[in-house]
Image: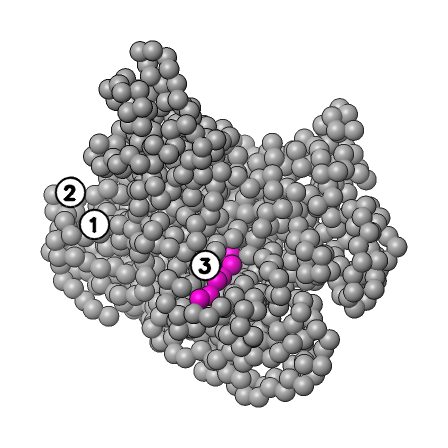
């Protein structure tokens, strides 16, 4: 860990303060590299491995018959990017969508730009590169036509799969021009003419359906789980039940006797920090999945549990509570919150603690990968969010050049952050290496494997303390998070949340409070902690948003009015002034914290829900909001609680401001899906540990929201479709406000405060 | 050797009697439309019809289907109710990742065959065996209602 004292480098922005910042290095995109000179700082897309690529020759090819093939370089896990990004290209290049075919890129960031689908970055980072790709292709087609007709370029215009010579009305089809266009020089970036907003045909228009929609409905879409190759064998792995555990002994005689079982292969135990390593264990290889599973059931195995063998969720919650009640590491400190608390009369002090348990991703398709080795080359077919990480893991494992490892990216049956870790691909490579050369190995995780061995969402106790005067003005705010860090994946023994985690709705709260302190407690991880859709925003927003509601009610004020007053008027705040030196890797100048946009979504969600209307008995409305991944979301939940405490979610109003709305129908789908995932974690989902082991194993004990518990009504409110704004993320922002909105609604309906998830039932 | 009737065709497979139909379909016959989600009949991704009844193929041994008609997602485009449901799934843009959708469609088809005009509650009850982690439930509801209306108007019959 390195500490750097920096002068404020944003002093020209209003309201900025000099800030002492701690720069913590960690792997990949969480690195907060602080350059001394702003001009050399790479932000956003430019700071990701591979950056962005604008070259139309990489992404677009046109056949002689006019069929346009566009490369989708980002994996599809349900957010629609395999459709939306090619759609942007098609729009700018004036291609007719019905003539477009999409092909999925293999792992190759040097060719395509960054391919890691996480952090709600696909449209956020690739909207402009894809517009430039499309514009460049259009200009090359126009140049080819102008050359063919020997006319000035200003006289030609690309229009719906043809180039028109305006003065004479002559037309040439894209198919006709394809070969010539591909030979044109790629236009320099500063000569590109991007479309005006009024010229869009597909962007923002909801005219395009998912490219795989029909295939999905017919059972023809191919996911990682569906890969088939001649001679392919199937493997499942028995893994140590405790993270850091090791094989003590295994007797595989009975396993090998199961009909169809071919071989038993040891997977080496994890060494040091988990990162993306396999956990270790024993693989059973068979002719089909069923035989492999039966073979695994027949293994006689003993494990050494290792250092995490006593991890127990009940005991650990006590550990977290004690840590949350003691001073922690300072992440933000303005004014003197400790003194304000010490001097405040008891009646003005408000404190609460909130608990969010571990969560499992539980995407409907468990992790799976197929690997085939031939000589000094290997080929992989898998459903992976981060294809290059998979390629590099396989290359390292098999001691091959990465250029000799081809990773084919298939459709993901969900990801939510689990499938950005290529541990399961590494396992497949290990087994492939143990089989006769050229044997394709499909390594399948069962649902039990997925629940037991997930890279879990962390576990948190969040402590909030405020001083609120008799007028209901909040004078002091302390938010202390006791929660193991994702950094523990990469540095053994790493304790307490890092800057990037605190900057997800703990540090970067914009409220007008004179004394603010944000701390993290140094607590250790005893599980593999990973990124789960919206990450640390989940517990931070749960705690802070429930707490604001508690303050509002205590002050006798309407929660919406109280929140808007606390936020204050519309203004842009330098994230650095909120001690946020991470800002999701984005430039603080380009992406300030805009309280006007936050107010806008709060007002839209409340208006949509009919905030303030008279409700039936047992019903309540609850509000929560969040700024995450550069987008602003607000949620109002209407809940009905019966006299037995059974909860029914009547309706959800979800408002989002993500800047320009490129594929609005898909944005709404993410908002609906985020609402349901947020309700799932609020109502039913919990991973607990006993004796170092995850207790849950399948959907009977790790419960997720089903159709009958889903709200019949989810109203999505997309606000502020502004193409002058840089784009915000879409996949994750809808999740964090949902659980606090639900719990605030339960309070409104019943007077009972929920501070611990999942709520299941109101006592 | 076991003989199976799948989507109106006869298929011969050489598998143990207790192998679940799911793995016979996917691994032996290459019919990967029916999905693996949990292996314990909890998630519905593996739903097929046996003599018209929706069944979780992950826990149904192949011996239980002997002499009976198995229908899978691959056969739905030849079925009038299947066609209506698939069309409605498209017009409502139901899918996100799409992995659970074959199972959702199979359950929806069997619901509409048994109950051509289901209430919202009947839909919720019938569909609650099928999990969607992406959260497409509101659109599933709308798609089933639209398919029911379309079938009632004789659209696809």
Above or below residue A579? Residue B79 is: above
- Which residue in the protein does label 1 denote? A577
Instruction: Tell me the colour scheme of the image.
Output: one colour
- Which residue in the protein does label 2 denote? A13
Residue A80 located within the stretch drawn in magenta: no
Q: Main secondary structure of the magenta part?
A: strand
Same subunit under labels 2 and 3?
yes
Identify the residue at image location x=47%, y=80%: A269
What kind of element bears circle 3?
strand
Q: Quadrant of residue A540?
A: bottom left
Choose mark 1 or mark 3, whichever is in front. 3
Residue A303: where, in percent of width, then height? 55, 84
Along the viewing direction, whichever of A462 and A77 lies nearer the viewer: A77
Residue B24: where, in percent of width, then height? 73, 60
Mark 1, other Cα within 10 Å: few <14 / some 14–19 / many ≥20: many
Residue A355: where, in percent of width, then height? 46, 61
Q: How far apart are marks 1 and 3 (CA)?
A: 43 Å
Identify the residue at image location x=25%, y=59%: A32
Identify the residue at image location x=46%, y=70%: A375
Q: In this view, does A232 lie to the left or right of A396?
A: right
Q: Is residue A78 visible?
A: yes
Q: Is residue A478 visible?
A: no
What kind of element bears circle 1?
helix
Counting residues from the N terminus, which is met first, the one under dot 2 or under dot 3? 2
Q: Which residue is farthest top? A: A168
- Which residue in the protein does label 3 denote? A407
Q: Is residue A97 left or right of residue A327?
A: right
Identify the residue at image location x=35%, y=70%: A490
Circles 1, 3 touching at the beta carbon (< 8 Å):
no
Along the viewing direction, whichever of A132 and A718 lies nearer the viewer: A132
């Amino acid at each position: 860990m390195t500490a750097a004292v920096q002068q404020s480098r944003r002093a020209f922005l209003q309201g900025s303060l000099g800030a002492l910042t701690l720069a913590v290095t960690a792997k990949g995109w969480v690195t907060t590299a602080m350059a001394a000179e702003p001009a050399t700082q790479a932000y956003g897309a430019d700071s990701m491995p591979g950056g962005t690529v604008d070259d139309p020759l990489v992404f677009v090819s046109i056949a002689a018959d006019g069929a346009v093939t566009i490369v989708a370089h980002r994996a599809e896990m349900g957010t629609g990017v395999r459709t939306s990004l090619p759609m942007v290209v098609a729009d700018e290049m004036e291609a007719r969508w019905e003539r477009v075919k999409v092909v999925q890129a293999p792992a190759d960031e040097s060719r395509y730009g960054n391919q890691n689908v996480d952090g709600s970055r696909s449209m956020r980072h690739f909207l402009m590169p894809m517009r430039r790709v499309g514009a460049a292709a259009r200009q090359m087609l126009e140049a080819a036509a102008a050359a063919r007709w020997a006319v000035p370029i200003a006289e030609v215009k690309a229009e719906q799969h043809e180039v028109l010579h305006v003065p004479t009305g002559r037309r040439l089809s894209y198919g006709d021009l394809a070969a010539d266009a591909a030979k044109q020089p790629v236009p320099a970036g500063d000569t590109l003419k991007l479309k005006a907003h009024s010229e869009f045909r597909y962007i923002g228009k909801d005219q395009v359906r998912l490219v795989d929609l029909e295939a999905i409905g017919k059972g023809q879409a191919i996911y990682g789980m569906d890969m088939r190759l001649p001679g392919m064998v199937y493997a499942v792995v028995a893994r140590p039940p405790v993270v850091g555990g090791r094989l003590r002994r295994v007797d595989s005689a009975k396993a090998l006797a199961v009909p169809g079982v071919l071989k038993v292969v040891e997977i080496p135990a994890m060494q040091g920090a988990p990162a993306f390593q396999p956990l270790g264990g024993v693989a059973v290889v068979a002719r089909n999945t069923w035989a492999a599973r039966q073979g695994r059931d027949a293994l006689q195995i003993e494990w050494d549990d290792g250092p995490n063998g006593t991890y127990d969720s009940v005991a650990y919650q006590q550990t977290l509570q004690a840590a949350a009640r003691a001073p922690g590491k300072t992440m933000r400190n303005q004014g003197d919150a400790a003194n304000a608390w010490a001097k405040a009369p008891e009646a003005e002090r408000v404190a609460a603690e909130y608990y969010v348990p571990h969560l499992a991703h539980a995407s409907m398709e468990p992790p799976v990968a197929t690997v085939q080795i031939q000589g000094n080359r290997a080929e992989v077919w898998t459903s992976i969010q981060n294809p290059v990480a998979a390629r590099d893991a396989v290359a390292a494992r098999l001691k091959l050049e990465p250029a000799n490892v081809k990773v084919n990216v298939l459709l993901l049956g969900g990801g939510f952050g689990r499938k950005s870790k290529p541990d399961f691909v590494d396992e497949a490579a290990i087994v492939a290496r143990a089989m006769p050369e050229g044997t394709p190995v499909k390594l399948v995780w069962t649902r039990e494997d997925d629940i037991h061995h997930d890279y879990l969402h962390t576990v948190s106790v969040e402590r909030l303390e405020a001083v609120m005067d008799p007028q209901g003005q909040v004078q002091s705010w302390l938010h202390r998070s006791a929660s193991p860090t994702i950094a523990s994946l990469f540095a053994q023994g790493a304790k307490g949340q890092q800057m990037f985690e605190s900057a997800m709705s703990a540090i970067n709260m914009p409220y007008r409070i004179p004394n603010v302190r944000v701390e993290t407690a140094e607590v250790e991880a005893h599980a593999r902690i990973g990124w789960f859709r919206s990450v640390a925003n989940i517990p931070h927003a749960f705690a802070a948003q429930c707490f604001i509601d508690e303050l509002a009610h205590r002050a006798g004020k309407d929660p919406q009015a109280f929140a808007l007053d606390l936020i204050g008027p519309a203004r842009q705040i330098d994230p650095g002034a909120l001690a946020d030196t991470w800002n999701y890797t984005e430039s603080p100048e380009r992406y300030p914290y805009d309280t006007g946009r936050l107010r806008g979504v709060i007002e839209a969600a409340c208006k949509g829900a009919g905030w303030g209307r008279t409700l039936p008995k047992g019903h309540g409305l609850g509000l929560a909001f969040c700024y995450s991944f550069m987008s602003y979301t607000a949620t109002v939940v209407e809940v009905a609680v019966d006299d037995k405490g059974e909860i029914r979610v009547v309706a959800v109003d979800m408002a989002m401001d993500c800047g320009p709305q490129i594929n609005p129908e898909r944005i709404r789908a993410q908002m609906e899906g985020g609402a349901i995932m947020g309700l799932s974690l609020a109502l039913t989902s919990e991973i607990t540990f006993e004796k170092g082991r995850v207790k849950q194993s399948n959907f009977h004990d790790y419960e997720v929201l089903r159709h009958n518990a889903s709200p019949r009504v989810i109203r999505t409110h997309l606000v502020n479709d502004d193409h002058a704004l840089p784009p915000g993320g879409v996949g994750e922002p809808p999740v964090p406000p949902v659980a606090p909105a639900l719990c605030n609604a339960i309070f409104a309906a019943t007077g009972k405060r929920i501070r611990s998830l999942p709520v299941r039932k109101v006592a | 050797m076991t003989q199976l009737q799948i989507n109106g065709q006869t298929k011969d497979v050489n598998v143990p009697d207790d192998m679940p139909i799911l793995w016979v379909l996917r691994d032996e016959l290459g019919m990967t439309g029916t999905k693996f989600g949990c292996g314990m009949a909890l998630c519905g991704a593996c739903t097929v019809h046996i003599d018209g009844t929706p069944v979780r193929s992950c826990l149904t041994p192949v011996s239980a289907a002997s002499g009976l008609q198995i229908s899978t997602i691959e056969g739905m485009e030849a079925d009038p109710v299947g066609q209506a449901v698939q069309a409605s799934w498209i017009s409502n843009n139901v899918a996100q990742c799409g992995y659970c959708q074959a199972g959702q469609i199979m359950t929806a088809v069997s619901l509409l065959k048994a109950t051509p005009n289901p209430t919202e509650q009947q839909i919720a009850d019938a569909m609650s065996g099928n999990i969607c982690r992406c959260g497409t439930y509101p659109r599933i509801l709308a798609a089933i209602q639209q398919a029911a209306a379309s079938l009632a108007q004789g659209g696809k019959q």
